[in-house]
Image (cartoon, rainbow, N blue to C red):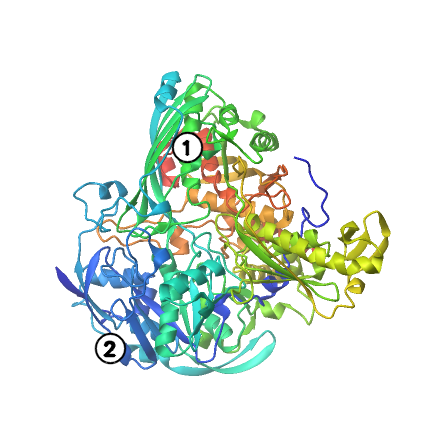
Amino acid sequence: MEEEAKGKGVSRRDFLKGLGGGAIGTAVISTGLLDPGKVEAYPTESTGTSRGKSVVNLKVNGKAYRLEVEHRETLAELLRDQLGFTGTKIGCNRGECGACTVVINGRNIYSCSQLAVWMQGKEILTIEGLVKGEKLDPLQEAFIEHDGPQCGFCTSGQIMSGKALLLRNPSPTEAQVKRALSGNLCRCGNYNREVAAVMAAAAKGR
Amino acid sequence: MAQKEFSVVGKKTPRIDAYERVTGQAQYTGDVQLPGMLYARVLRSPHPHAKILSIDTSKAEKLPGVKAVIHHQNAQVPWASGGHTHRRYIFNNPVRYVGDAVAAVAATDRHIAEDALALIEVKYEKLPYVLDAKEALKPDAPKIGPDGNLSVGPGNFSAPITEEWGDLEKGFKEADRIFEDTYISKHVNNAQLEPRVSVAKWDGGKLTVWASTQGVSNARTDIAKDLGLPLSKVRVICKYMGAGFGNKNQAQDYDLMTAVLAKVTGQPVKIEFTREDDFIGMHGRWSSEQHYKIGVKKDGTITAVDLDAVTNMGAYRKQSGNLSGTDFYDIPNFKKVIKPVHTNTVVAANYRAPAYPQSVFGFASFLDQIAHELGVNPYDMFLKNRARLYHHKTPFSSNALEECIQEGAKRIGWNDKWHKPGATPGLKKHGIGMALGGYPFRPGLGAATIRVNPDGTAHVLVGVTDIGTGAKTTMAIIAAEALGIPLNQIQLTNGDTDVTPFCIGESGSRATAFTGPAVIAAAEDVRKQIFNIAAPQLKAKAEDLELKDGNVFVKSDPSQKLPLSKALSRIGSEIIGRATTNPTFKGVEGKSFAAHFAEVEVDSWTGHVRITRYVAAHDSGTILNRLTAESQIKGGVVQGIGMALTEELLIDRPTAIPLNPSYRDAKVPTHLEVPEVEVIFIEPYDPYGTFGGKVVGEPPITPAVATVANAIFNATGKRFKVLPITPDKILQAVQV
């Protein structure tokens, strides 16, 4: 029993997008659920269009940038790799965990699921932008006091979702806080702490 | 068990690195950027069992930006800690599960590396495979290892795992009733937020690896061994770590792949796992099928337990596969036979308290069931049978399990709230349940260095990585307490094998138990030197001096004092204290204990379970930092809730492909499912502990699954013997 499991035919990234799993993608081809012979072969250059570049003008943490970005580059990659704002984390790169949450024009948004080219004219706030000189944002102070971070990898995202909430509703109920942060997973399970911290910051702001 | 007076220990101390963690300044492994750095991605097997006939990488190598492709033919590097029963390499042929690594590509950016994976042409010859552990033990099952599928390895990896004491036959004879049943737990992923990532760089013959690891020391040892390098030529750094819960201990294959790719290309390389890679390419908790025979007296007293179980370890045996949930009970006659089994599925290994929550689920659910059938209140059942001795023989170094049960029950209001199972009228059924748990505590090998500067500030060097436990803060607290120098005068350096001394790593809840005593001993070393220097200045003998709050003073006359900075002003250099400690138990065994209680509301119309209240009572000895310890307890409970109600890695039978390797589909708990977890600490002073403290990290997950399951039984009157207890299972069992 011999067969070829070639990657030809469909680019891995297309499969990732379509099926949400690299291993599933290749496996589906090779186990015959999709006959590789019947899948229309894309030339390798098919990825060429996504590798095109454009210039975007955007504001990050109050500072204006004019940047050349690849079409397939995400905002999370732009922030981390081009601008060095590594406080924004990538946990799943598929819009599920919330570690990459930033505030765009006042709303909390997964930066891994936004293409950088869509950011033309946008105002982006990251965790690094919350500190004013030496002064921490009340949310950051509350996260320290209430032990918001355990491993800390989700913390930036939790804080940014909390920030977006407090920007639109300075006096949320506990249920509203939970709802607003429900797109931010914390595998350390520190949810009680994160909610308490946002509630405390809200109380301080009143 | 006297409580000692502490000045720093036992308070609610915010993390010493909290500022970095809330401002985005903490540098995790994935944040490391080096000039000229390449990005790497891994190609994985789509087949559960197959021989690789050929790999053609020519097209991939031609893609502009691709710098190297490695696979089993050109990079045959052993991965010793990846498997203990048959030789495992970073790339294996045959591949033994869907997700087994086949090749890795390094390219100038991560998208090109991903594109290149699709251009690698692999010819496979599919081999027969087996997914189910019991099927795998049948004589005609496809063999995964050279010796078959019972996972027999050396030393700790022998099989079956057996343990026996007392006289089982006598125990069953003494029983009034004998019960038999089977409980099943599923594979769940650790699912830590930080994906696997590793950065490697060679400077001549020296390798530096920025790893996301639970232990820099053992990662260095493993990398050096697998690559055939002396320890001095390997440096492992991990300052901030985005959790692992047991799946980032030792060196992992991706650390080795990165090192090889960096060597081959002559450039630094960063490998990044996708989240799918993380779910299928590393490991999760071993699933189990546990068959119990339990003998009891009419009043519920256990006379004998016979446990026969299989655990599914997947294709490689990375860790034990044991089940130890019976540890928290007094069982006079006991036997267990656990068979760790190889199958062609995702590898199973350590996940927070590896041998416990699934096993506590089985045993504590069954005890709860037996209590019900005997007409005994579960509270009495658990209290009566709680562990008083280790394995019915050896005393514990400390044991407040009884108080945990009593205080936890009081807090949740057990007496008022417990009712007959399924007795609530209406659609929404109230239930209450409990279970016992904990985790072994033992002291062991640790090392620490402390430098006290001429200005009276101190620098503590320890090898801990702090995977989110707060270990850095705990070490600083221990140092402050032991030195007599205020916490804010202490700087801590961690997680760098070129700088910090040996550390066992954060696994097995050992950071404090092993490294804590070394910090205390290093502090003693420093204090002696300080007292010798200060003695002539205070016109006293060194042994009559004390150091507290940064002042050296005469014990008998504290008014005779000198600020540390003044006492040390005449010596130009710093004072260095160091210690390697390895305390052992004498005639005792150690354990942290816990009793958990939950109230649930089960919607018998939708099958939805809402946990309305949760109380976790813990004996971890002295609590060194109340703030971070409480967070640990809360977090362990949340992970247990996920395992009880939603999480399970599903594998498609016809293709052996994991179906839900993602956060959304694996259904890890979110903010919305989690109740306020009320934490109670009972604090006996453990004579072997660090300032009386035992272990905190792993105990809280252990009873949580069974606690929720028992509460669901109390709500519905139906016993769920297969995890997770999902709404569909509840709806099938509960007639509206």
The residue to which callout 2 is attached is B59
**Badge 1: residue crowd in 10 Å (few <14, some 14–19, many ≥20):** many
**Badge 2: residue crowd in 10 Å (few <14, some 14–19, many ≥20):** some
B383 over A166 or under it: above or below? above
Report helix, strand or loop for mark 1.
Answer: helix
The residue to which callout 1 is attached is B363
| Residue at 37% across, 66% down | B228
Residue A106, position in %: x, y?
57, 67
Residue A91 got which mark?
A: none
Quarter assignment of residue B162? top left
Q: Nearer the viewer, residue A159 or B272?
A: B272
Name the side, left or right, on which B606 lies relative to A192.
left
Residue B110, position in %: x, y?
38, 73
In primary-sequence order, the first of circles 2 and 1 is 2
| Residue A198 in view of the camera | no
Where the N terminus of chain B falls, by quadrant?
A: top right
